[in-house]
Amino acid sequence: MTADADAAKRPRQPPGIFLLFGVEMWERFSFYGMKAFLVLFAVDSARGGLGWSEASASRLMGTYGFMAYGLPVVGGFVADRFLGTHRALVIGACIIAAGHFMLAVPAVPTFFAGLALVAIGTGFFKVNASTMVGQLYEQGDRRRDAGFTIFYMGVNVGAFLGQIVCGYLAESPRWGWHWGFGAAGVGMLLGLTMYLALRRQYLAGIGDAPKRIAAVERPPATPLTRDERDRLIALLVVFVFTIVFWAGFEQTATSLNFFAKNRTDRMLGSFQVPASWFQSVNPVVLVLAAPLFAALWTALARRNRQPSTPAKMALALVLMATGFLFMVLAARAGSDGRLVSPWWLVAAYSFHTFGELCLSPIGLSFVTKLAPMKMVGLLMGLWFLATAIAEFVAGQLAAVKDSFSTPASFYLMWVVVPVIAAGVLLALTPWLRRRMHGRDV
């Protein structure tokens, strides 16, 4: 029986995907809830913030993002060799919660210690949650892309709730920054509790620790086959283009966040919309659009007309560039110092989200398809390492935005570079597909 015929007799999705949806939702509640206002806290000097410059705050975000997305390389390796994805995920969740509660203590030393703990915990949690999704599917199961898209909806439901709840508490004069940090910790504890309560029922056997084998009994390590080496090369090439995408996308937390705070009309009647709330446009649009994208990929796959993963990623780059085109127009509209309409940011974030749907859940699925079984956790970590590099680059570029002749020219850079990258990726697509050896399905 073929994998497709076997899949047709199984439920549409394994039930474990919905538990992983939930635990990822709460972890992202904590992660994005805090990230939404981190630079705003850093530049604040009137309500207990750090009182830094925007450039310093952007560099802080870049460094933190690099650590949070780079440490999954270590987390994936440790899970593959020693702990298993289940134990690594639980350890990571505990460390994340501890970090957020430390951030809630109003002191500079606890601020930096808390950030470090959140980054370390994310290294253990993030990569292994994604790897467990891949472990739910057999090789060749065409439900995989749709499953990762469902999982990605959990990411964005959590991001939306976190940005609204934590952002409101943090920016509200009644509560304050440290209430926002504390709320993020509570969210992580809720996710951990749900996972531990339901794991045996819905994820039995998924993520167990690798069996310990005595050195004398362990078979010698087998070298990678030629096909496996080719697939690794294809993965590494694709990783380079994801750096371009995420470096632009992550302007959300820095330059676009400051644009929302300083240059956008945020009054809704007598209520001033918190600047951090604009970032919630991304998860709202994604949750609404994700089922459509999942259905689209599934329908195209059924007709054998689904675009290759590199082609989808090239489209993602073009969509992100389109979003920044709105920011170019917004910056020009406010060149005389006027506050501009919030709809410019809404339009930009919407197109960035469409691009994200063409790249991020598809990319996670792509890694689990092409990676050799013994290296899935490590290569999932490398996927996040590419994002880590992008986070660092994003923070460094946001820090020098004022060195551009105009704000519009800074955003224009994010239109031109992704379009060029998309063209190069499309040109490389036939070469990449040959090195996938039929795994891009």
Image (spheres, rainbow, N blue to C red):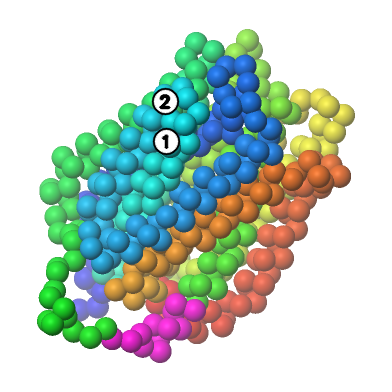
Quarter containing the N terminus: bottom left
Q: Name the residue under label 2.
A: 104
Residue 212's tag is none
User: Which residue appears at 23% of the width and 86% of the height?
Assistant: 220
Please state if 379 lies on the left or on the right of 349 as rendered.
left
State the image coordinates of residue 129 (x, y, percent, origin top left). Answer: 32, 53
Snapshot quadrant of residue 59: top right
Q: Mark 1 points at which residue?
A: 114
Quarter containing the C terminus: bottom left
Total numbered labels placed on residues in the image: 2
Q: Tell me the kind of residue under disc 2.
A: Ala
Give the farthest residue toward the bottom: 226
Q: In this view, does 245 lie above or below 309?
A: above
Residue 303 shows up from this direction: yes
Is residue 110 in the magenta section? no
Snapshot quadrant of residue 60: top right
Q: Which of 246 and 404 is in front in this view?
A: 404
Q: Is residue 106 above or below residue 199?
A: above
State the image coordinates of residue 183 (x, y, percent, origin top left). Answer: 38, 26
Magenta residues, dominant SS class: helix
